[in-house]
Amino acid sequence: MKYIITAMMMLVAMNQLNAQTIINNSPTENRAYLRVGIEPTTMITFGYQRNFIVGFLNRNVTSYAEWGTSMYRFNFNNSELKIGAILSVFEKGSFKVVNNLNLSAGSVTTHNFDSKKFAAGDEVAIGIYKKSWFIATTVEYEKIYLNRIEHTEFYRTTYYEDAEDGWYKGAGGMFQFGIESGGTIKKKYDIHLEIKMPFTEKFNSYGGSPFHVNLGLGYRF
Amino acid sequence: MKLKKLWVLRIVAMLITLTLTGCGGLLDPDEPGNLVPKTVAEDPLLPRIEVNGTILHAEAFGDIHNPIIIFLHGGPGSDYRAFISQIGVENASRYPNERTVTNGGLSQLQDEYYCVFYDQRGAGLSPRFDKGVVDFDMYVADLDALIYHYLQKKENETGIVDDQVYLMGWSYGGILSTGYINKHPERVKDVIMYEPGPFSKKVWDYFIENSESPFAQIGEDWLDEYLLSHDHITPDAHERADYQMLLGAFRGQPEFNQNPNTPLWRLGAFISSENLDFSQSDNYDITSNVVASFQGRLLFIAGKLTEEPYPDYPDMQMSYYPQAEYVAIAGVGHTGLWEKPDEVAAVIRNFLTQ
């Protein structure tokens, strides 16, 4: 109980955030952004952020929605929609701990199966956040809660004719450990770079790209 | 108004109950048989033998009075389905009594030979093993036990005492054949290989030097599918890992000119990540005894399309054998066994009757 009270007091006492890119704390309320990179394949993501005050916390929260799709197979069937909120949970001078909670729904089509997934994720960034730049280390966890999997005729003919189509309990989860940095130019333009190392939720090899890399560009208005 | 609130509460309670009870009715991706077929450990209807302390998915075709050929599939981690299927014909069912064709692929050799097919430990429909359990010596011991099993069966059923078999290895099966011959040269009469994997570090280096960088595959559909699938499935459990790995089957190596429709039952993802092919080894020896002790011959078969990017490969490989012949099959690559089984079978018959 002592820890809960302390945590609540710290929350109330905290100032507004100064983070540059993963959170938009400038006086402007909105930010549009574009992100390109490898996560888990070559992706392009379009996003929108909006700030608002959470009354009971007396805190500025950055909400966001983004849609990312494969660059090489640019369509809704190979994309992911994510909504989330970013909030500073600890702050002392330029040092901050920032939490990013999100929900996502994604789709992938392959020659073997089509899958829809629903997941929840949380990222904690710990770093130095100055007015015009920041650098932070990040830890991220995403849990897949539900999959809808349908197999193709090719899969049944070539590999397994009795494969089960339907709703599946989530097919896994992943951790990512990384570092990210960014800066703001002329108070309006953001640039953001992150490098992350993915693992499965049981800390096995993720199996895809050994690193995830993203470059983001933002515009505040 | 109160009634409405009550209904909302009921719905919320129902959702919470569903969540807490594991969302009854949802399929489990890790349950055998949902995404990939059950192995012999879970499916009693699959053909099998028990050797060297394990069960293996295996079956034999033909008259046991005839000479025995043991077929060794590729991978490591693949299975023998492509050996007994062929292009243009329904792929062989995993249940022998459901097959519409019983002499497909190289199983057509059953009219002259007793043809034995098996899935290596951890591969195909043989039982799974966790990482770090299986090694190359175990694979050699399994093969030795399997050869003994069939020679003994022959003796028991026919009275014929035979102490040698033919081996036929495809891709990784060629590495395993060579490792076996290096240890038990007296057990093998002759060996046939279709595009065997590298027998030494020197050949591995040549192979890598002449292969495209994996980065050249960026933008290919199969790779994009494979990578994006990681947002949906993570390979912690055997079934999920096997399922995901199938996205790259017969697609990842453009120089091999593989036909992506080549069938298989299951790719053992965990076993394929073991260093059973020595691709991660700087120093290993599976050949030092072959030239001095092996009395038999090697027939090296390759597809013309694979020969082109690796012109020196056959000679480099054949140099590890005292007697070797080379035959190239036109118009096919690494999956030529499945695409032109009649032609490959004719080459094998001709070689074995010389």
Image (cartoon, helix red, strand yellow):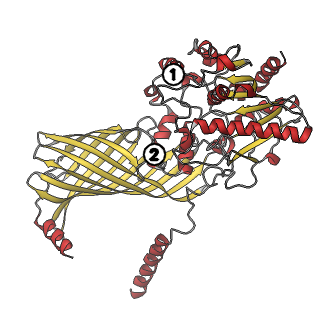
Look at label 2 and name its amino acid: His
Residue B79 lies, in percent from the top left, at: 67, 39
Look at label 1 and name its amino acid: Lys
Q: Residue at x 80, y 38 (%)?
A: B150
Q: Nearer the viewer, residue B81 or B15?
A: B81
Q: In terms of image quadrants, where is residue B185?
A: top right
Dot 2: chain letter: B
Label count reads 2
Q: Quadrant of the N terminus of chain B?
A: bottom left
**Circle nearer the N terminus (2, 1):** 1
Residue A159 lies, in percent from the top left, at: 66, 43
Instruction: State if disc 1 and disc 2 touch (CB < 8 Å).
Output: no
Within-10-Å neighbours for mark 1: few <14, some 14–19, many 20+: some
Residue B25 lies, in percent from the top left, at: 57, 67
Q: Could you say whether the residue bearing mark 1 is in a helix, strand or loop?
A: helix
Say above or below: A133 vs B110.
Answer: below
Judged left or right of residue A136, residue B109 is right
Judged left or right of residue A166, residue B349 is right
Q: Which mark is residue B230?
A: 2
Q: Residue at x 17, y 70 (%)?
A: A8
Q: Which mark is residue B86?
A: none
Say above or below: B294 vs B61.
Answer: above
Residue with the mark numbered 1? B201
Dot 1: chain letter: B
Q: In terms of image quadrants, where is residue B336?
A: top right
Judged left or right of residue B307, residue B2 is left
